[in-house]
Image: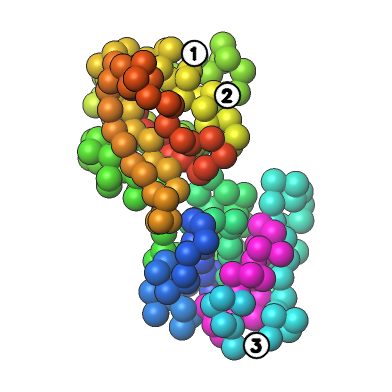
Amino acid sequence: MNSNPTSGKLYLIPVPLGPSPISANLTPSALEIIRPLTHFVVEQAKTARAFLKAVSTNLPLQQLQLAELNEHTRADALEALLAPLLAGHDLGLLSEAGCPAVADPGANLVALAQRHGVQVIPLIGPSSLLLALMASGLNGQCFAFHGYLPTKDAERSKALRELENESRKRRMTQLFIETPYRNRALFDALLNTCQPGTRLCLATDLTLDSERIVTRSISAWRQQLKKEAPPDIERRPTVFLLLA
């Protein structure tokens, strides 16, 4: 229940994970909610406008109010971003792709909205993490998402060993991501660090025509590299899943 009846509602709007039709990613009911909105907080205005144009908002793009929230936004700027909500306007929150507030700076705005008693409404749309977990064949009863791992070799290997040990103890699927141009380095680190029986899933280009989701043991991945080229994951959005 909304404890601040004078405020608007904060809608968390999922964005397609790549170049695919809006109708394939958002439900008709979600589109009905998005189209009348006039105020948005977005990660990048340029890509947000392209999304909103595809949505066919009720107002022309030039009349929509877009404010940016990204990794460079200062904490003391969040109150100003929330101001339209507190003034009674409904507000849409968008990230660059997938679900806002998950591995996304929008989480800070959601936290502030909750503190102000604003009603927060997540809309149905694509989540790369859940899609990857569903298709991986790994444990969907117990799992954790860790965002980005360290980029330095020694720190990354240490983090992978810790995740693998926790996975073995708790039968927990571990999910993490990487900046796409470093995907191959993370894949190589996984093969060099993890035990042969540990299972690794690579879920690449989810929801796109080029989607590929493959789960193999570490030993099977190593054997494949002796006969074939490495998986084509460089510069392609990929979710990594591990189960020891």
* Nearest the eye: 155 or 39: 155
Magenta highlight range: 34-52
> Left or right: where does residue 68 sit relative to residue 176?
right
Residue that badge 1 annotates: 158
Q: How many numbered marks appear?
A: 3
Q: Give the amino acid type for the residue marked by disc 3 in the picture.
A: Leu
User: Quick one: SS at disc 1?
Assistant: helix
Q: Quadrant of residue 209?
A: bottom left
Q: Residue at x 25, y 35 (%)?
A: 138
Residue that badge 3 annotates: 59
Task: Locate the N terminus by quadrant.
Answer: bottom left
Q: Earlier in the sequence, mark 3 or mark 1?
A: 3
Q: Position of residue 2 (x, y in %)?
A: 47, 72
Residue that badge 2 annotates: 150
Task: Please rate how many residues cluster around mark 3, counting C-alpha atoms within 10 Å: few if below 14, some from 14 to 19, many from 20.
Answer: few
Task: Locate the C terminus by quadrant.
Answer: top left
Q: Earlier in the sequence, mark 3 or mark 2?
A: 3
Please say if the residues under marks 1 and 2 sit with CB atoms less than 8 Å apart: yes
Q: Position of residue 170 (x, y in %)?
A: 26, 24
Image vertical order of residue 33 relative to residue 243, above or below: below
* Nearest the eye: 46 or 168: 46
Distance from disc 1 to disc 2, alpha carbons, whole Å, reads: 9 Å
User: Quick one: SS at disc 2?
Assistant: loop
> Left or right: where does residue 138 sit relative to residue 112?
left
